[in-house]
Amino acid sequence: MSTTLPLLPAQLQLHRGGTSVIVDLTTAGTPTIVHWGTPTGVLSDAELESLALAARPQRVSGGIDFPARLSLLPQETFGWQGSPALSGQRAVGAWSSALCTTSALSDTESATIVSEDAEGGLRLITELLLTGAGVLKQRHTLTNTATTAYQIHHLTTVFPLPTTATTVQDSTGRHLKERTAQRRPLTVGAHVRESRRGRPGADASLLMLAGSDSFGYRTGLVHGVHTAWSGNHRLTAERTITSDSFLTAGELLLPGEVVLEPGESHTTPWSLGSWGHGLDQLSARFHQDLRARPAHPSRPRPVTLNTWEAVYFDHDLTTLKNLADKAAAVGVERFVLDDGWFLGRRDDTAGLGDWFVDAAVWADGLSPIIDHVNGLGMEFGLWFEPEMVNPDSELARNHPDWILHTPGRWPVSARQQQVLNLAHPDCFAYLLTRIDTLLTEYPISYIKWDHNRDLLDASDPRSGNAGVRESTLALYKLLAELKTRHPELEIESCASGGARVDLSILDYTDRIWTSDCIDPLERLDNQANTSLLVPYELMGAHIGGPKSHSTGRQHSLGFMARTAIFGHFGIEWNIANISDGQSTELASWVQFHKDNRELFHTGTSVHADLPDPAMDLRGVVAGDGGRAVYALTQRSVSTTYPSGRVTLPGLAAEARYRVSLSQPLDEQVGNGQSPLAWPLHETVLPGAVLGSAGIQSPVLFPEQSVLIMLTRVDADSARAI
C-alpha cells in the first residue's frame, strides 16, 4: 500500500531484487539518495534517521555555510558547484532553479517525488523504480507552470557512487570495431561521454561503469548506468572536491529541441542503474529485466542466413535459390534477403527510399524467392533502411522537403545518403504505407532495419529547429505501428552494424546486429562488452566465410562457430558451393546450437578473470545450475607454455559436475605433445573446486578455441540429473 510521506523529518526506503535504495527527503532542494546498492534489510525509522544523519557533511574552511548535497537534482541555488542536472532559461527571468520537495508517494519498490519552484514557475516529478532484478530506474518530468516559455538545455538523472568507486570504465569504437573497453582513474572532475550522432553511434559508451580498483567480471564492487534512448545522449562519471562521486545518464538535447510553453511538460528517457560484485552480477540484473518483459522473444531464436556477405547486390534468382537450398540442408530456419531488391538499387549510390520491388531484377516480384524459401521450411526476412535516402532516388527528387536539412544548405553526405525527417507527417505516412504494403503482400516475418549514417546538421526544414529528438520519437511510433499491424513480425536493429544499441530500441525490436565485423577474434571483445547490457538471445552472432570481409583474417569454421554459438546464431557466407565436408561440419554446428540454445538464451552468462590476457573463457550456466557450456579461446601466443589451469565461474558451489570437451582435441586446434589427461577420464568435481582450483587448459594454437561441457551429477552415483 502506498503512503504519503511527511517532508521533515523523513526518509524512504526501497528494497527489491537484492538492491536497497535509501532516500533522505530532508535535504535542501530535492531529496538525496544516501545508499544505492547492497541490501540493507528493512530499516526502522530510527535507523533511517541515523543513516541520513551519518551522511551529512561538515562545514569546512573556505566553503559555503550550508554544505551542498548530491541530491536527485542538485542545484546551484542550494550551493551545488558540480555539473548541473538541470539547465534552462526563459527569455526574461531567473535562469537558476530553486525546486524544493513538496510531496512524496512511495511503496517498497517505487517512489514518486514532487518538487516545486513557484517563483521560477517549474514543477519536477522524479520517479524511482526498483525492478524485480534490482535495477534502479529513474526519470524526471519537468512542467512549466509559468506564463512564459521555458527552454530546457539539459536535464539528467543522478546516481550516487560508494566511496570504493575509484576506477571508471566505458567503451568507445568505430565502424567494424564497436564497444572497445577503456579504463581510467575516477579523479576529481568530470569524465564525459557524449553521443552527438543522432543515434548512439559506433563510438558510444553502452554503459558508464565505476568500481573498485581492478574490478573484474567476478571481483570488485561496481555500479553502472545506461540511458534508454536511441538519439543523442550523455553519460558522465564525476568526483567533486567535496568527495561526492556519482554517475549521470540522460538525453543530450540540441538547442531548441525542448521549449515548454505554459502548462507543457517534458519527460526524460528512463535511465537505468545496475550494480554487482563483479560485472557478471551487474549484467545479470539487466539480462533478467529484459527477459521479464512481456514482449521479450519467447520462441527459440531461428538460425538465420543473411545474404549480404554471400551475394551483396547480385540478386540472381537461381543463385539465391541455390543458396536457400544449401541453407535449408544445413538446418537454417530463417533466410534474409539483404540490400539490392528495390527500385534502382544496383549499388549503394542510388534507389534508397524507393521501396518498390524492382521489376528489372525481380520481374515476377519477390514471390519466386519467398515461395522457394517457405517451401524449404524457412521463414523469409527482408532488408530495409527506411530512415535514409539517396539523393539519386525518386523519393529525394519528388520530396526534398522530407529530408532533414537547414534551409539553403544540405548536410555533408555519408554513404551517398541523406536522412529523412520521420517527424514530417507525409514522410511518416509514406514509409508506413510502403513497408506495410510489402508486409501485407508477401509473407515476410522479419525485417532487418538498417541505419547506415550519422546525423549531421539535422534540422527540420519546416522550422529550422534541430530535428534529432522528434525523428527519434517518430521512429518509435513507426516501429510500434508496424508491430501493431503485424503482431508476429520480428525486427532487427542494425545501424552500420552496432551503432544503435540501447534499451529503448529494444522495446520495439527483437535483436540487435552487434557489428558488421564478424571476424571471430574481433567479435570476442565486441560481444563481451555488448553482453554487459544485452543478453545473448538478442545479439546477432554469425559465422562468416573462411576469410573475413572486414579484416582479411582467415579462420577455421570451428573457431568461427565457437565464437558465435551463444548468440542469436546465424550464417553470413555464400555456402551454395561449399564442400561436402564443410557442409557436414556447418550442419553439425547448427544442430549443436539448436540442441543448446535454450541454455544459451535463458542461462546466466559468465566470464572468468584470467591472469593471462592471451586467453579468454566465457560461458553460460543454466538457471538451475544443472548444465553449463564454456568457450575457452587462445587469443594469441601466451608467454607461458602450457598455459596452466583455468577456473570455471558461476557453478553451484555444492553441486558436482561431470566435465568434458564437446569434441576431442586434434591437430587443428592445438599442438600438445602428449594427451590432456582430464578429458580421457571420468572427471567429476564440485562447482566450488572448478571455480577456484580449476582445470588444466589444453595447449591451443592462437586464434583457436574449445568448448567445455558440464553436467550436474547425482552426489552418490555420479549419474546425470
Image: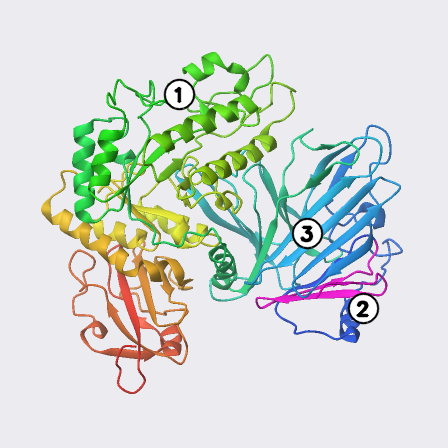
Q: Name the residue under label 2.
A: 53
Write down the region rendered in magenta.
1-28
SS at mark 3 in the image: strand
Q: Are marks 2 and 1 in contact (CB under 8 Å)?
A: no
Decide which of tag 3 and tag 1 comes sooner along the chain.
3
Residue bearing the label numbered 3: 158
Q: Distance between the residues labelled 2 and 1?
A: 64 Å
Q: How far apart are marks 2 and 3 (CA)?
A: 21 Å
Foreground: 130 or 82? 130
Q: Nearer the viewer, residue 190 or 196?
A: 196
Q: Name the residue under label 1.
A: 354
Image quadrant in which the N terminus is located:
bottom right
Magenta highlight on residue 520: no
Q: Measuring from the top left, give residue 306's x and y in whole percent.
A: 29, 39
In which quarter of the view is residue 185 placed?
Answer: bottom right
Q: Tag 2: residue type?
A: Leu
Of residues 587 and 476, the one nearer the viewer is 476
Q: Residue at x 27, y 77 (%)?
A: 720
In this view, the residue in front, 613 or 435, is 435
Quarter of the image with the C terminus is bottom left
**Residue 19 covered by magenta stretch:** yes
Residue type at mark 1?
Asp
Residue at 45% in and 47% down: 180
Q: Distance between the residues labelled 3 and 1?
A: 44 Å
Total tally of numbered discs in the picture: 3
Q: Position of residue 55 (x, y in %)?
A: 77, 65
Give left or right: position of 429 versus 313. right
Q: Is mark 1 on a helix, strand or loop?
A: loop
